[in-house]
Image (cartoon, rainbow, N blue to C red):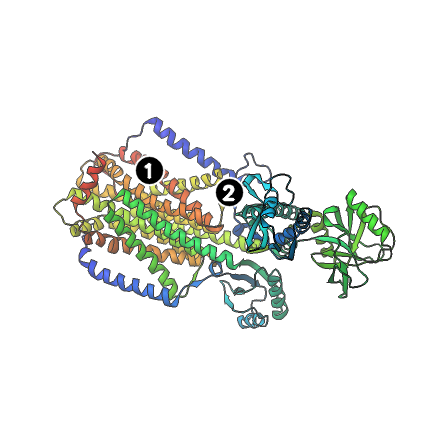
């Protein structure tokens, strides 16, 4: 593949686009908020399977409502006859809750019901989980910043962090816009996106650094452009194979992994975009040149 | 970079064979393993329950502070300290006193201080004193509370273990988590509700006489028939004196009942009490509720007795189990529960494996299409990569969860990246470099740093995820992290060696097609 696409001329419009999407994401996260799952909000989740496939979802709702459990959410979950019930439970340590729900449902629906999965997270634990999730994401961003700072110049590390924030905020923003549930596995996905997006950025940065030294007469726009083009087929191929694997999980991996794989698919797409259109322009902003690199080499090799 | 010495080749493939050997261990017969190492399935794949229990030490603190009342009053009296307005609060004892200085000296004396022992481990007294004018409050010190909490937690873990062992689940995990919590993992458990109700009961049993009238020192408790009885506060004998309890059927009524055996001391106490109180009623109180209150027909000196109440055989079985395992020092709350039924676990394994196979095939086809023979090299190393990944998981006896399978699939997608980086680099070099061998050589050298940098970032994310994640998410971090290490090994050593065989065996400038 012999490509010579003029990326750098599109930096400006791409940056404006990024900024708009980024701002919309922030607004949604702030004002619409996030749909936290029970991991972070506390409550009870029940995945059930009924042998009688003709149960009406409204029947489940009405029989649960008769129990006065507060906010109850029922939805179909994968196959026919499979449902997911979420109870925002106020009482702590209610040992009788699950058997009571089971009995009510069996009595009212006249069907054999199997609770395939039960999760119950108390309010204290859920706030701890949320806290450690936020710490983990913050810490991973800090670690990336540090790593790039050691391996490259500080301008690169700023660029990488800007790109990471861009990816993380937009991914979470899309989850907010679509009201998708944020749970522990989404945190795992976000952290993996951080790793993946970083990986992509590093490959391009590596090439930019090499080309800055090789072609000292080119300015940063030209060098970025050349480097992005040179690594473009790798960027595309790796994104493609990763997406192949992720779509396989998304389609065949079952309900439990769906949110996770969706977040990862978003992240890979956004991450690939950001390493070209966010991480590279930051270097231009800082007017990085081969001289920027020389300083560091002098320091290392006395 | 393409020249391998014989010794290098030997080391590379020996390492590969050694690690892949462990992956085979997962296929040996389960009941008679040669080497007992395998990848464990997480609770989300094999079904089972994860429970996080929290002790609540408040009732215990209340109980302990109450137990200080008598020795404290004794100390005050023996030293002629006049006190007034004595109050027993939940967490402290409050009273007014004139000679506070003298009291302070006595309270913090290190010599034979039974009221306020000195805890050597922490260099602190058990009790602390808060003085306000001539009003004093005696309460537990920070380390006193810690000691109470720690011993309650240790004891609770022991009781929880006994109860779970008694139910007979396979390979339970019971661990302390932090200062107040107990983590319980019960693989393959079918009925989490029963375990939860067994762990949720304190099971404090005591035998107390039913008082005739509302005299001082009685509790009003409801009996099993709903009748309100005045039960004396004085405990004749408690569950601690029980050495065995078994469910059986009452001979006379044919109702389920629990028979118990007392230790020597318990038998003495019980014998004396029943001798002295023939004709009276004896209340059997469990966690503040009367199970039954039979009349004492005759003295029972043997130390054997029977508790009959209004229960089913299952309830009698559980009661016997609780009595055998002993009382929890303080109530336990379930603060987190995650239970997965075995059929959902099976479904998860199936869908996980299906998506792994499909993802794998897609990536393999893509690589062959894109890189032809070198795609094959990448694919061979991808297979080797997976075998090694399973091998390392086996060596570590790691737990494979559903997100863990997702991590493996993701590794498949990302593992080819190392090869892609190298192949693309070689392609570029081929444009300017006339010698194919030289181009491959330079390609590997130049791509090395990039490959390393790019993978270390993902590894950092995996390590952080492992440190902060819980349960299934940890499983994801493990497979993702190990996947990166095996990817680096297979891409950088095995793929490079296989590539060198192809390149070196072809004539210059011919037939190398990337």
Q: Residues within 10 Å of mark 1 (few under 14, many from 20)?
A: some
* One can see residue B172 in this view: no
Quadrant in which the N terminus of chain B is drawn = top left
Q: Circles 1 and 2: CB distance less than 8 Å?
A: no
Chain letter of disc 2 in the image: B
- Which mark identifies residue B39? 2
Q: Residues within 10 Å of mark 2 (few under 14, many from 20)?
A: many
Quadrant in which the C terminus of chain B is drawn = top left
Task: Point out residue A78 in the picture as x, y percentages from the top left corner.
Answer: 49, 62
Chain letter of disc 1 in the image: B
Q: Which residue is mark 1?
A: B492
Task: Point out residue B462 in the picture as x, y percentages from the top left corner.
Answer: 40, 47
Task: Point out residue B45 in the picture as x, y percentages from the top left corner.
Answer: 52, 51
Task: Point out residue A269 in the picture as x, y percentages from the top left corner.
Answer: 32, 56
Left or right: where A229 falls relative to B392 = left
- Marks 1 and 2 on same chain: yes
> Foreground residue, B437 or B95?
B95
The part of the image, by quadrant, that contains residue B389 is: top left
Q: Secondary structure at mark 2?
A: loop
């Amino acid at each position: 593949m012999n490509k010579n696409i003029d990326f750098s001329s599109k930096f400006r419009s791409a940056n404006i686009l990024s900024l708009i999407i980024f701002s919309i994401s922030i607004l949604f996260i702030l004002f619409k908020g996030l749909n936290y799952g029970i991991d972070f909000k506390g409550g009870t989740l029940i995945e059930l399977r009924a042998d009688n496939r003709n149960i009406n979802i409204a029947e489940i709702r009405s029989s649960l409502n008769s129990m006065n459990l507060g906010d109850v959410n029922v939805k179909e979950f994968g196959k026919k006859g499979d449902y997911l019930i979420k109870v925002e439970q106020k009482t702590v340590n209610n040992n009788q809750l699950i058997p009571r729900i089971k009995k009510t449902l069996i009595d009212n629906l006249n069907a054999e019901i199997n609770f395939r999965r039960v999760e119950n997270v108390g309010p204290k634990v859920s706030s701890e989980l949320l806290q450690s999730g936020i710490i983990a994401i913050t810490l991973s961003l800090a670690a990336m910043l540090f790593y790039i700072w050691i391996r490259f110049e500080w301008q690169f590390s700023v660029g990488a962090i800007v790109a990471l924030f861009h990816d993380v905020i937009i991914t979470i923003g899309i989850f907010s816009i679509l009201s998708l549930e944020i749970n522990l596995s989404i945190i795992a996905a976000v952290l993996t996106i951080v790793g993946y997006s970083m990986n992509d950025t590093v490959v391009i940065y590596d090439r930019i650094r090499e080309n800055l030294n090789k072609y000292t007469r080119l300015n940063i726009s030209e060098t970025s452009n050349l480097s992005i083009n040179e690594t473009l087929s790798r960027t595309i191929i790796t994104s493609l194979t990763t997406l192949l694997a992720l779509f396989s999980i998304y389609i065949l991996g079952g309900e439990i992994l769906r949110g996770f794989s969706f977040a990862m698919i978003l992240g890979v797409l956004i991450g690939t975009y950001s390493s070209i259109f966010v991480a590279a322009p930051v270097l231009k902003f800082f007017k990085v040149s081969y001289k920027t690199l020389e300083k560091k080499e002098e320091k290392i090799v006395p | 970079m393409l020249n391998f010495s014989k010794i290098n080749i030997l080391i590379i493939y020996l390492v590969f064979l050694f690690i892949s050997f462990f992956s085979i261990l997962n296929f040996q017969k389960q009941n008679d393993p040669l080497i007992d190492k395998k990848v464990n399935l997480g609770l989300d794949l094999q079904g089972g329950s994860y429970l996080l229990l929290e002790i609540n030490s408040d009732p215990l603190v209340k109980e302990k502070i109450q137990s200080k009342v008598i020795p404290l009053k004794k100390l005050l009296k023996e030293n002629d300290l006049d006190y007034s307005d004595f109050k027993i609060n939940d967490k402290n004892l409050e009273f007014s006193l004139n000679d506070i200085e003298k009291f302070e000296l006595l309270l913090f004396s290190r010599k034979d201080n039974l009221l306020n022992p000195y805890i050597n481990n922490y260099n602190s007294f058990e009790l602390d004193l808060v003085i306000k004018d001539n009003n004093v409050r005696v309460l537990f010190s920070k380390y006193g509370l810690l000691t109470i909490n720690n011993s309650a937690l240790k004891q609770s873990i022991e009781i929880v273990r006994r109860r779970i062992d008694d139910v007979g689940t396979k390979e339970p995990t019971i661990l302390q988590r932090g200062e107040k919590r107990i983590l319980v993992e019960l693989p393959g458990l079918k009925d989490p509700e029963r375990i939860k109700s067994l762990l949720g009961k304190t099971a404090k049993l005591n035998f107390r006489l039913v008082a005739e009238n509302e005299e001082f020192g009685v509790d009003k408790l409801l009996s099993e028939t709903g009748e309100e009885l005045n039960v004396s506060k004085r405990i004749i004998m408690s569950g601690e004196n029980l050495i065995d309890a078994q469910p059986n059927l009452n001979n006379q009524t044919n109702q389920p009942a629990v028979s118990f055996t007392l230790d020597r001391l318990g038998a003495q106490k019980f014998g004396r009490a029943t001798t002295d109180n023939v004709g009276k009623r004896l209340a059997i109180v469990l966690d503040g509720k009367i199970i039954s209150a039979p009349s004492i027909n005759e003295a029972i000196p043997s130390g054997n007795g029977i508790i009959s109440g209004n229960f089913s055989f299952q309830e009698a079985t559980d009661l016997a189990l609780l009595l055998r395992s002993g009382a929890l020092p303080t109530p336990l709350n379930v603060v987190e529960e995650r239970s997965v039924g075995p059929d959902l676990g099976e479904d998860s394994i199936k869908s996980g494996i299906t998506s792994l196979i499909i993802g794998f095939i897609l990536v393999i086809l893509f690589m062959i299409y894109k890189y032809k023979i070198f795609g094959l090299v990448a694919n061979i190393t991808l297979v080797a990569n997976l075998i090694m990944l399973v091998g390392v998981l086996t060596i570590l006896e790691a737990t494979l969860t559903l997100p863990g399978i997702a991590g493996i699939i993701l590794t498949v997608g990302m593992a080819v990246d190392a090869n892609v980086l190298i192949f693309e680099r070689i392609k570029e070099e081929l444009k300017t470099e006339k010698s194919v061998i030289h181009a491959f050589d330079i390609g590997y050298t130049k791509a090395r740093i990039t490959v390393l940098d790019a993978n270390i970032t993902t590894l950092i994310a995996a390590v952080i995820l492992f440190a902060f994640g819980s349960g299934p998410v940890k499983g994801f971090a493990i497979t993702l992290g190990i996947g990166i290490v095996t990817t680096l090994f297979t891409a950088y050593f095995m793929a490079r060696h296989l590539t060198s065989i192809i390149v070196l065996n072809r004539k210059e400038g011919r037939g190398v097609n990337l």
